[in-house]
Image: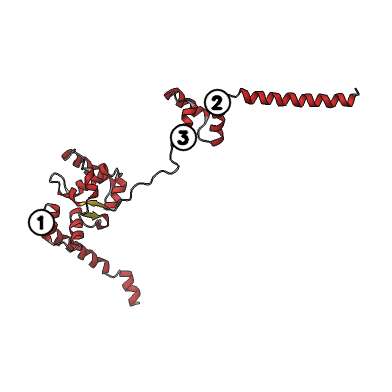
Amino acid sequence: MNIGNKKKNSKKNHSKHNHDNRSDSKSSTGPDERISENLANTGIIEESAFNYIYSKYGITKKQFLELIKKIPKEIPQKEAIDSFPISILRNSQLSSLEAIVKYLRENKALSYEEIGKLLSRKPKTLAVTYACANRKFPKRFSSDIASENERIEFSAFKSRLSVLESICIYLRSQNKNYSQIALMLSKDPRTVWTVCKRAEKKIAASSANNQKPNNNDVGETNG
């Protein structure tokens, strides 16, 4: 056999030897090693982080991947809240603001910042309000009230009016008379009348201030 043929056979044997080594390497790879490769490829978690989870909870890599598959691809959005049931205002132990804040914190799991936006109030003030409400009335409002039809929309609340004033003015805008509002809120009709009149004066004064011409505007007109 000439030298050229020997070189060709040597290359073939070397190539076959490498291929066999690769095959042996693949066949010797266990399930845990393959799962580690899958973790690295998918970018779900680093190996060091998984080792921590394994040491703390005893979860195998196979179990971990099964748990990952069960995680929903889309996180459900928080329920949009635009109103609250009026029945919470009939609690004799709480003020209107205390009842609303307690309901939103406990039944709707809203933060003070979220409640503040709905009620046009400062979050720090609401935190104090909730503490007072919880001390007066530790029990949680029933979950059944969520389906009640009589509700107050959060669009009713204005920063210039108190909570009770905002509620009474809103109900008046819904064509409710003083007696009906008093019944809905468990208040004396005279109290409702007083609150409504006070709120109307505030609204009128605010409108009058907004209609006053600015001094700069007057100067520009005269000029």
Give the foreground label among 1 and 2: 2
Is any atom of residue 11 visible in this view?
yes
Q: Amino acid at mark 1?
A: Thr
Q: Which mark is residue 31?
A: 2
Mark 2 packing: few (<14 Cα in 10 Å), some, or many (20+)? few
Marks 1 and 2 sit apart, C-alpha to C-alpha, by 75 Å
Q: Report the front residue among 84 and 219.
A: 84
Residue linked to disc 1: 191
Task: Give the secondary structure at mark 3.
Answer: helix
Q: Position of residue 175 (x, y in %)?
A: 18, 64
Which residue is found at the position 19% from the left and 52% from the top? 86
Label 1 residue SS: helix
Observer-side mark, 2 or 3, equals: 2
Q: Dot 3 corresponds to which residue?
A: 68
Q: Quadrant of the N terminus?
A: top right
Nearer the camera: disc 3 or disc 1: 3
Q: Is residue 1 above or below residue 120?
A: above
| Residue under the point 28% across and 52% down | 118
Q: What amino acid does circle 3 point to?
A: Ile
Give the mark nearer the N terminus: 3 vs 1.
3
State the image quarter where residue 152 is shown.
Answer: bottom left
Q: Nearer the viewer, residue 98 or 181?
A: 181
Residue type pointed to by label 2: Pro
Query: Label 2's element?
Result: helix
